[in-house]
Image (spheres, helix red, strand yellow):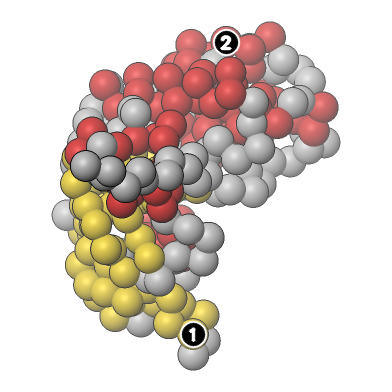
């Protein structure tokens, strides 16, 4: 569903990505972990279409999309939830969600499809139905993240990218958000998640890539990486004890 090959990109003369290759298949939740400045968000922007790669390939659902607009890429079935969420705080929760359905507003069954999409979002995050008439800006940070994810789902995507979905959230809310991502994966969606909370995301993803200075330095199964002492010390906050024997 999502594939990059030897992807390079950055900002002006600053090359951030230095040949990054990743892939995510339908029904997979794949994480990208690494320190601040490793290029994780830049990778998502190059895939999303808000940043044009300088070299390499990006494919979404088998279509080369490098250089295409973000709108075109959404139409291919890939939507992104940005770290900034980008909600309209003065609009209601419902209005913010409906804005995500812009691709499906035409046709004789448009109203039915809209309601079906809303029902799916409300089933995933019941609190949004309760707060549907509330301004998005009046919600807690966790609820706003749910709105951001819900709005992305209103595009009816086959793939979803999320940039730091747990940032600034309480542990209970993080568990709720991650449980929702696991459910979406089980339903066949492809998910690519950039996440600073490496321990939490490695517990729910199938595979992960470790990014350092714009390059993939390690990749593998989630359990394999969780048990790797080098990964533990660098990204999980676990000090590696020297063997005293």
The C terminus - image quarter: top left
Task: Name above or below for residue 231 compared with residue 91.
Answer: below
Q: Quadrant of residue 133?
A: top right
Position of 73 with respect to 99 (left or right) is left
In this picture, is 185 found above or below 24? above
In the rendered structure, the answer to whether residue 215 lies left or right of residue 125 reads left
Residue 224 position within the rendered picture, expressed as x and y whole percent measured from the top left: 20, 39
Label placed on residue 39: none
Give the mark nearest the N terminus, 1 or 2. Answer: 1
Per the model, the C-alpha gap separating discs 1 and 2 is 44 Å
Residue at horizontal 63 percent and vertical 12 percent from the top: 127
Furthest residue toward bottom:
13
Q: Is residue 110 visible?
A: no
In the figure, is residue 135 to the left or right of 117? right
Judged from the image, the secondary structure of the residue bearing numbered disc 1 is strand
Q: For residue 56, what is the image quadrant? A: bottom left
Residue annotated with mark 2? 126
Graded by Cα atoms within 10 Å as few (under 14), some (14 to 19) or many (20 or more), the crowding at tag 1 reads few
Front in this rendered view, residue 17 or 116: 17
* Label 2 environment density (alpha carbons within 10 Å; few <14, some 14–19, many ≥20): some
For label 2, the SS is helix
Residue at left offset 26%, top offset 21%: 186
Observer-nearest of 86 and 21:
21
Q: Nearer the viewer, residue 229 or 23?
A: 229
Number of numbered discs overlaid on the protein picture: 2
Where does residue 135 sit, x and y in percent of width and height? Answer: 80, 27
**Residue at point 51% right, 19% down?**
176
Residue drawn at the location 35% of the way across and 23% of the way down: 182
Q: Residue 120's image quarter?
A: top left
């Amino acid at each position: 569903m999502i594939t990059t090959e030897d992807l390079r990109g950055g900002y002006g003369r600053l090359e951030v990505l230095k040949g990054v290759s990743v892939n995510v298949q339908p029904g997979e939740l794949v994480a990208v972990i690494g320190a601040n400045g490793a290029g994780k968000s830049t990778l998502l922007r190059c895939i999303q279409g808000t940043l044009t790669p300088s070299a390499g390939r990006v494919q979404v659902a088998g279509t080369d999309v490098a250089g295409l607009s973000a709108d075109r890429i959404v139409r291919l079935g890939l939507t992104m939830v940005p770290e900034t969420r980008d909600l309209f705080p003065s609009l209601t929760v419902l209005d913010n969600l409906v804005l995500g359905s812009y691709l499906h507003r035409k046709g004789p069954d448009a109203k039915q499809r809209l309601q079906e999409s809303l029902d799916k979002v409300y089933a995933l995050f019941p609190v949004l139905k309760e707060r549907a008439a509330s301004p998005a800006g009046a919600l807690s940070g966790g609820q706003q993240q749910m709105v951001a994810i819900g709005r992305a789902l209103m595009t009816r995507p086959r793939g979803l990218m999320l940039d730091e979905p747990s940032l600034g959230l309480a542990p209970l809310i993080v568990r709720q958000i991650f449980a929702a991502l696991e459910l979406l994966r089980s339903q066949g969606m492809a998910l690519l998640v950039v996440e600073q909370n490496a321990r939490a995301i490695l517990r729910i993803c199938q595979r992960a890539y470790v990014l350092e200075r714009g390059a993939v330095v390690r990749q593998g199964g989630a359990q394999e990486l969780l048990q790797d002492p080098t990964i533990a010390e660098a990204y999980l906050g676990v000090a590696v004890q020297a063997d005293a024997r």
